[in-house]
Image (cartoon, coloured by chain):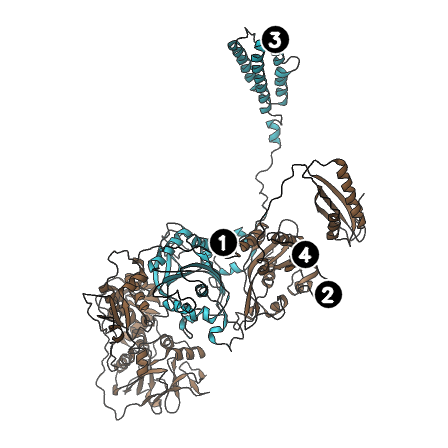
Chain colours: A brown, B cyan
Amino acid sequence: MRILSSWLHEYVTGLTVSDRQLADDLTLRGIAVEGVFDLGEFGALFEMDITTNRVDAMNHYGIAREAATIYGLDLKPLNAELSASKSAARSVPVSIEESKLCGRFTARVLRDVKIVPSTGIVAERFRLLEQKPISNAVDATNYCTLAIGQPTHVFDLDKLEGGIIVRRARKGEKLRTLDGVERTLDPDDLVIADEKKAVGLAGVMGGWDTMITPETKNILVEAAWFDPGVVRRSSRRHLLHTDASHRFERGADFNAPPVASALVSQIILEVGGHPEGELVDVVIPEAVARTAKRPSVTFSLSEVQRMLGPTEDPAGITAPMAVDILARLGCGVEEQKHATDAAAASTQDLDPSRAVLGEASLAAPDARHANGLYSVTLPSWRLDLEREIDLIEEIARVYGYNRFKNTLPTFAGSVVELPWVEKERAVRGTLLALGWNEAISSSFCSADDAAYFVREPGAFVALDNPLSEEAGMLRPSLLPSMLDMLALNISRDVEGAALFEMGTVFSGGPERVDERPSLGFGATGAAFGSQLADFCDLKGLAETLLGKFTARSIYFDRFPADSGLIPAWLHPGRSARAVLDGATMGWFGQIHPAEAERRKLKQAVWIGEVWLDRLYKQALRQPIIEELSRYQPVRRDFSVILPDAVLWARLAGALEALAIPELRRFEAKEVLRDPKGKLTPAQHYSLLLRVVFQSHERTLREEEVQRWSQQVVAAIEAQGGKLRT
Amino acid sequence: MQENEIPPLGGYSDAELDRAFAEVAREVEKTAVSLHSAEDKEQFRLAWLGRKQGRLKLISDAWLKSAPPEAKKQIGQRFNALKAEIERLLEMAGDGPAASELDAEAIDITLPGTRRKLGAEHPLIKTWNEIVSVFQRMGYSVGVGPEIETDYYNFESLNFPPGHPARDTQDTLVVAGQERKPLRDRLLMRTHTSPVQIRTMEQQPPPLRIVIPGKVHRNDAADATHYPIFHQVEGLCVDTNITFGDLKGTLDFAMKAFFGSSVKTRFFPSFFPFTEPSADVQISCPFCGGSGCRKCKYSGWIELLGCGMVDPAVFGFVQGKQPGYDPKKISGFAFGMGIDRIAMMKYGIGDIGLLYSGDLRFLEQFA
């Protein structure tokens, strides 16, 4: 919204600060000036950013009131005087059928008007504000909105058939609005109608058929107060956000319509014509009680201090200061002499025939302030003020937030850590240490991906208004986006990528959505050095990660391809399940060739997911150290040829079965397979096995090492293997 | 003293022994100065320790063997000390290769170091942890809540009534199939971390100090500074006598702890349905110190936080479950900040989308 500083000066006399200072002072009071543009002799143009609760400040008069409050200056009352009206035989009948939705409707008839381009101050201000001029009559309504924030509408009176009715739209009723669009109305829309048809969408936009044209001779000026909710619903339903709807849906000033009507009429009549009859002003009493004549609020100075705390200035916020601020903002403030006054006090009178904008019934600050309790009546233009705390905010705001002392609260409680924070830290720390990079990705995925990666079939959650079709589902797994990210890196030509993400995955349905923490990881290319990432990189990660937690047993297994137990996204022959204490913790391996092809991934991609909700059920492992042996270990390497059918696990089992206490550990130093059968016989592989013997009690003797080595060889031979010669 | 000669010994008194041995020691030192090559050392060794002609052998023969039994101990001690010193000098000279040989073995130390790949911590997580730890040091516990919320927790209990225009500013992603439920039970992606305020208060009576980091979602079109996903840290402090001044002091302290002690804060009135009074907080630009730079758009100030005193209506929503939240007796403040924005500012990230891209060329810079 744009504001002219010169226009503000019209309403506040004695405003002497520079425009830039004024902008700063307003901003510090919450009336944010985002930009100040110098207009030379015409002052400055302010680009405003007004918060949604301050509809009263979305116009020049409202901002002028703020300026007057800040500097303690007088705000000029508004008065629009009309030339004497010729009495009409009968006034325009106005009937409000929906008294809950339209609280006030004023209509004024102007006869023998001339429709011409605007001149003078209206034209000049429109030019400075870059507001498009249309004609004197239409411009008058827009000018009124800019001036005092009250939306109004002008009808070509001769196109109205009969009196005005404010009613709900009929089902399927049509209205062509001023923007030329023919709209089908909903029974929840409120319309302004004549006896035959709808002529305007209440509070949003007028109708095409009754609009002002160069031929218009007679005008009906509408200024009304509509319920914020109905205007908002219509505006959203018809995707019509207008200056009028913006203001009505935030709560317009109930007392403004007569003033607005006079202001609009005055501008139109400047080039000819005359009013006819008196202003028709229909007021719904229940609406008055909700707006202009709300119950007064009890306000206490001690509550100001309790909520706001001490100020830099030791004098603090005094009673006269608080009373003055509220009064300048338009509140009626009266000190309560007795506690019982609170209930009885409700003072502001409403006189609909009188323009009361800017007028405040200000009780003189009483010198006694015996109990510091006040009855405060609320201005009709500030529907955002309802409670004591609202008044306290006004005082803090006008006094200046930065004038309150910075203090620190004392605290006697203790800090509570979430039970899994340390586990989360351990998981993240392990992955980072192993050289995996953390990523964060979208919480959404496509329906296809959701179906493919879901843990429990069908248990995925759709969005009603997704960002795009590709993001229509809440992700049931971290892997679809992991694959997207790996693909992006491949397309960027990185040599290798190892990524992980720790995030929430979703399952359930419309009734209930479950959220679970999960860990997704994926690697491709030369991610950890010069060698290509492979299955063992993922298994190493899984072993290290699971090894951080307490477990009686950790193992990895695989199922036949046709078992139906393997997740669809995994290559059945190159994947494994991670099991801790009998519970599945997750799956990992090479992506299924079919999915790789769908995603056009040509190089091997390795992915996995660990279900952290399950892993976090385990306590973190507390290291308990093993006593260090003082005696030398003895290493023996065996180069053996084994049939392909003998898996490492089988060989390891056979070695463990030897039950040699001094056999401390054994490892596969090198595995060599040669499909061509040149380096190894067909269906055989070559293995370099290292075995380490060590005792805690003594130095090992050559002959016993020799004996154990023979046992190892025998075990290998029992598996069908033999020593390489 | 000639080679293979030793000074004469004039008696067996302590003074005479000291003199004689000191003279020998000086000679040892003199001859040990230029032990550069292996040859030098061998010569030195032979001259002193040689079994046949070494000077120690001569000393042993000439002084020790002919000494009266009562003086042998005195000579023996001095002799051993001298021998130890000679051996020490020999050892110090080392038996490794000569300097010239070592120079010949020089490697190219200008070659790049072998850098084992470190996993890179995500800049958002890094920033998240830094912010949270500042508040933890101030006595705040960490809280979390679900990313899928009900309308009640995301809006209604935070004083956004149904149909309120303030809901417009938080375009919401809604879970499908909610039409038949009452509005308050409808599921949506939380648009802010504030619902956790309500959930925490429902669980726990005052006093309360909690900081809540988390992922949030809005139905926003993506551009350089907006993304449908972002992260917030929310804070809530409730106790008796919590004032607006406490809110200001706490945030001023926290911003100084996070950005450095010279950072200043200033507060502007703002509007959030769940706080009153509400404020926006700016900090003096930590990059230029307030003189104006690209990061603060030459204003010297950066807007960083939204905050305010907890609206009594919000306490009203939790009082049913926790009567301790009586707005007449307690008060509190809440604040929230965008982790993405702070990370972007801190690391000079121009496009928020990079944070969610998984692009290694970006992520690896944080390793």
Q: Could you give the CA–CA distance between mark 1 and mark 4, rounded to whole angstroms?
A: 33 Å
Numbered disc 1: what chain? B
Circle nearer the N terminus (1, 3): 3
Check disc 4 and report the residue beneath it. A556
**Which corner quadrant holds the N terminus of chain A?**
bottom left
Write the residue at 62% across / 25% down.
B95
Q: Share a chain, discs 1 and 2? A: no
Within 10 Å of the Cα at label 1, are there few (<14), some (14-19), or many (20+) other Cα atoms? Answer: few
Check disc 3 and report the residue beneath it. B62
Q: Where is residue A16 in the image (x, y as percent from the top left)?
A: 23, 63
Q: Share a chain, discs 2 and 4? A: yes
In the foreground, B314 or A244: B314
Three-letter amino acid code at the position of disc 2: Asp
Q: Is mark 2 on a helix, strand or loop?
A: loop
Q: Could you give the CA–CA distance between mark 2 and mark 4, rounded to whole angstroms?
A: 18 Å
Q: In this view, does A613 lie to the left or right of B335?
A: right
Check disc 1 and report the residue beneath it. B126
Q: Share a chain, discs 1 and 4? A: no
Three-letter amino acid code at the position of disc 4: Phe
- Residues at marks 1 and 3 touching, judged by CB atoms closer than 8 Å: no
